[in-house]
Image: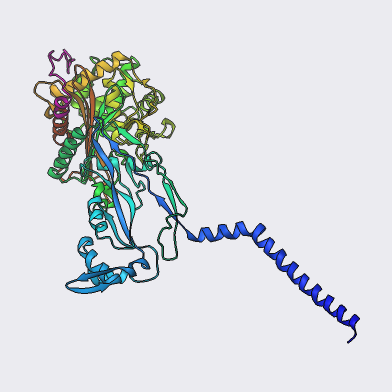
Amino acid sequence: MTGRSLVRRHNAVLAVVLAIVIVFAGRLVYVQALEGPRLAEDALNTRLSHKTIQAMRGDILDANGEVLATSVQRYNVGVNQLKVREFTAEIDGEEKEGAVAAAALLAPLLDRDPAELGADMVGDSTFAYIARGLTPEEWREVQALRIPGIEPEQTSERLYPNGNTAGNVLGYVGRDNEGLAGLELTFEEQLRGVPGSSVVEIGRTGQSIPTGLRETVPAEPGDTVHTTIDRDINFRAQQIIDETVDRYKASWGAMVVQEIDTGRVLAIADSDAVDPNNYQASPPENRGSRAVQAAYENGSTGKLPTFAAAIDLGAVTPTTTFTTPDRFTTPSGQTFSDADPHPTEEMTVAGILATSSNTGTVMIGDRIGDEERYEYFRSFGMGERTGIELPGETPGILAPPESWDGRQRYTTMFGQGMAVNLVQNTAIAAALGNGGVYHAPRLVDGTTDETGRFHAAEVPEGRQVVSEETAAQMVTMMEGVVTQEGTGVLGQLDGYRLAGKTGTAQVPDENGNLTRTVANFVGVAPADDPQFAVGIVVYHPRHQVPSSIIAAPAFKDIAGYTLQHLGIPPSTTPASLFPMRAE
């Protein structure tokens, strides 16, 4: 090989080597300068442990600040199955290690079988649940064992300290603390808060790296919801309605207490109320509020809007007299009868209401137009949802006049051929007690956020349904229902003047036959200065007795308790009632 050839060969090898060096150098520059940050970020991400910090759900309070629903701190416990392998302990004089040793110490504290617990602690997971819902005290006992790999997950538990009191109003939450019913569902967005997060850089076995990345965004607790419910009144109302339902073997019952001049509902009591702490123990049909969700024919309590409309339009006065037989046929050929046979009497409008005469009511209602009466019904809130803050409210049933047949035109005068829910019916009585001004029933005054700022709930303006004079005359006539020869005499209360109206309606059984009844009552107290209204419904009592026997005493009981609880003094002036019969 000549010297020139050797040089060429040497140069060729050198060129190849330089090319290789350039390629590797370029690759090194590419990796370090361009891909390096991304690769480093990818590596970091594989070492990061992300956890969600659950927000504490806001409290629900009653009108006096008493806690109806709250959240308490709890801990779920997990095990890093890699780290627990390092643990050793002397158990019963013998050296044990790993999951066996840890399970032997933890089992008594977690109320678990040691063998089953030990099996759950074996594997390659860096976090596997071994217990849920520990109290802070229970977690501290676990923590004191200092077992490597035993790690907490902070969570919360929803508690209802008053058991089933207002349970159907409050509702309940699911396993993930989300609202499933009642106010818990309606105010889910306000109550749930905003979850936080934590990011920790961990090593191969799941241990945190002391000098690694550690970031925490704290959770924001939910708002506090301030209700209008008075816990004590609601508790007593539930006792009364449960006793009434049990006594008369009814399918269900409900009771509402509403402030006259604000629409604030002080109590909604449903029979067999759900305990939100253990809602699964109640059948699904008992978990909602029938006071809001169930529509029923209101029967003779439905006469109140008819009488109010007739008086307000000037068609009659409380002392206008009608010849009222126990059976009456209209000019259109429709025949109606009263509940009990009686001789034909000259009754005043006040007497017709007191005795709950259907025949007299038809004569009164016939003096005003159907469209006019329908508009009064609507203004009293019938046929539309009240907007109360509970899910599933029924609007009731109120067909327009053009769809009424020849008979329904008359039956709607006395509360048949239409339907209401109990909150609607109570609001009618409240409007009459409030000088004719209707206020939509409501359950929430407002919310308080985490900064302590109170946000008042939007309150619809009241509307004048009938004149103040008409309302006052209606209350006086309703007082006659309770204190004269009326159907509500069992609602009388010593020391206080009360006013109300009984109602009994027929409802179909499972075969469509009208063999069942609904007993209900609405009223105000005290009659001389109304402060609150009460509504009661008892559905399908097996003992077929009228509402005057079933519902009127329940009205007296809850009215008496509420009057004393609110510190309302006894009545000091005697009643001045309208005559019942022609003089």
Q: Position of residue 107 (x, y in %)?
A: 22, 65
Side (left or right) of 230 relative to 441 = left
Identify the residue at image location x=18%, y=37%.
Answer: 235
State which quadrant residue 123 falls in: bottom left
Q: Quadrant of the C terminus?
A: top left
Q: Quadrant of the N terminus?
A: bottom right
Residue 539 in view in this figure: no
Q: Position of residue 510 (x, y in %)?
A: 28, 51
Residue segment shown in magenta: 560-583
Between 79 and 455, which is closer to the camera in this rendering?
79
Question: How many marks do you count on the picture?
Answer: 0
- The secondary structure that dominates the magenta segment is loop
Q: Position of residue 4 (x, y in %)?
A: 91, 80
Residue 533 in view in this figure: yes
Side (left or right) of 96 relative to 561 = right
State which quadrant residue 130 falls in: bottom left
Residue 565 painted magenta: yes
Between 111 and 359, which is closer to the camera in this rendering?
111
Identify the residue at image location x=48%, y=60%.
Answer: 47
Residue 416 painted magenta: no
Q: Position of residue 51 (x, y in %)?
A: 42, 54
